Amino acid sequence: MPPAPAAENRAASHPDFRSIRGAHRSFGIVAMLISVGGFLLLVLLSGFAPGVLNRELFGHVTLGLAGGIGQFVVMAVTAWRYTVHMERRIDPAVDRLRADIARDEAEQARFQQARVPQERRFGSW
């Protein structure tokens, strides 16, 4: 059995690692676009179209105030979806990857131990 590659190389070439990276990256891009995009929209509207944000919705509540409070809701929902995403897609794949690497390292250690040459003993005359 040839020596196994380093743990970092084994992890990077593992299919679970690639699925973890893809799932994490795709969720991160969508979450960032929604969160930052909503915040940026609110900031740009307040700077360039304050009349839109000053429209009353009901009573003394304006569209700008509702949008500002809405940002807290968007961030809370994004954080909640992130934890759900991690529990459902990322954590199980990470657990499988860790178990595979630990099993490979234990096998490699047994192999290395078996290859250690035994001390030669010569009989007496």
Image: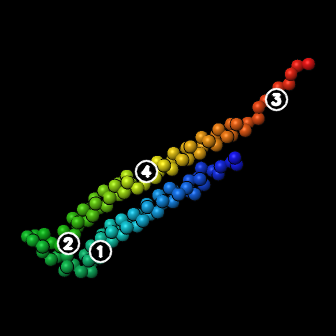
Please report contact status of discs 3 and 4: CB closer than 8 Å, yes or no.
no
* Frontmost residue, 28 versus 111: 111
Q: Which residue type does callout 1 highlight?
A: Leu
Query: Helix or strand or loop: what does disc 3 sit on?
Result: loop
Marks 3 and 4, the one that precedes in the sequence: 4
Please report contact status of discs 2 and 4: CB closer than 8 Å, yes or no.
no
Q: Residue at x 59, y 50 (%)?
A: 7
The dot on residue 41 is 1
Mark 4, residue position: 92
- The residue at the far right in this view is 125
Q: CA distance from mark 2 to mark 4?
A: 41 Å
Q: Position of residue 18 (x, y in %)?
A: 51, 60
Mark 2, residue position: 64
- Asked if residue 120 lies left or right of residue 36, the reply is right
Marks 2 and 1, the one that precedes in the sequence: 1
Viewer-nearest of labels 1 and 3?
Answer: 3
Please report contact status of discs 1 and 4: CB closer than 8 Å, yes or no.
no
Q: Residue at x 20, y 72 (%)?
A: 64
Q: Position of residue 119 (x, y in %)?
A: 79, 29
Viewer-nearest of labels 2 and 4?
Answer: 4
Q: Residue at x 46, y 48 (%)?
A: 95
Mark 3, residue position: 120
Q: Which residue type does callout 2 highlight?
A: Gly
Query: Helix or strand or loop: what does disc 2 sit on?
Result: helix
Please report contact status of discs 1 and 3: CB closer than 8 Å, yes or no.
no
